[in-house]
Amino acid sequence: MPSETITIESSRERLVFLVKWGASAVQIMGYTATGFGWTPWNLYLFLVGVLGWFAVGALWNDKALMLVHLVALGAMIAGMTSN
């Protein structure tokens, strides 16, 4: 039915909206934590934000968005494990 399709699409759009803004808020907290020197909390916040934006890229089927955040995630994990 068309109404079910609209409901499913609205649910998906709502999920993307929540993940996108949640990940953005967490990344802003990561920037704030970096500014105040709150290590390693800044890295944990950035990890959550990067994973959130990767999920948004997957939900949108946006390969460029997924690639950027996958590379960022890899760089962060490599940096964290080298220390």
Image (tube, grey):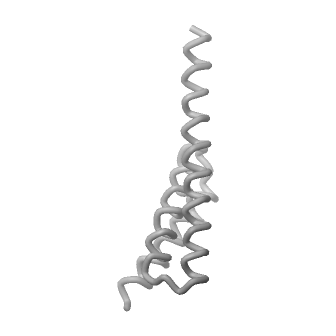
* Left or right of residue 40: residue 18: right
Q: Residue lying farthest front?
A: 36
Q: Identify whether 80 is placed above or below 16.
A: below
Of the pair 54 and 64, the residue shown nearer to us = 54
Of the pair 54 and 7, the residue shown nearer to us = 7
* Left or right of residue 42: residue 24: right
Q: Position of residue 27 (x, y in %)?
A: 58, 66
Q: Position of residue 17 (x, y in %)?
A: 61, 42
Q: Residue lying farthest bottom?
A: 83
Q: Position of residue 46 (x, y in %)?
A: 51, 70
Q: Identify whether 24 is placed above or below 60.
A: below
Q: Quadrant of the N terminus?
A: top right
Q: Identify whether 59 is placed above or below 3.
A: below
Q: Quadrant of the C terminus?
A: bottom left
Q: Position of residue 6 (x, y in %)?
A: 62, 19
Q: Identify whether 55 is placed above or below 12.
A: below
Task: Write the residue at 50% across / 76% down.
Answer: 42
How many tags in the picture?
0
Quadrant in the rendering for residue 40: bottom left
Of the pair 7 and 30, the residue shown nearer to us = 30
Task: Write the residue at 44% across / 71% down.
Answer: 44
Task: Write the residue at 53% across / 57% down.
Answer: 54
Quadrant in the rendering for residue 69: bottom right
Task: Write the residue at 35% across / 84% down.
Answer: 81
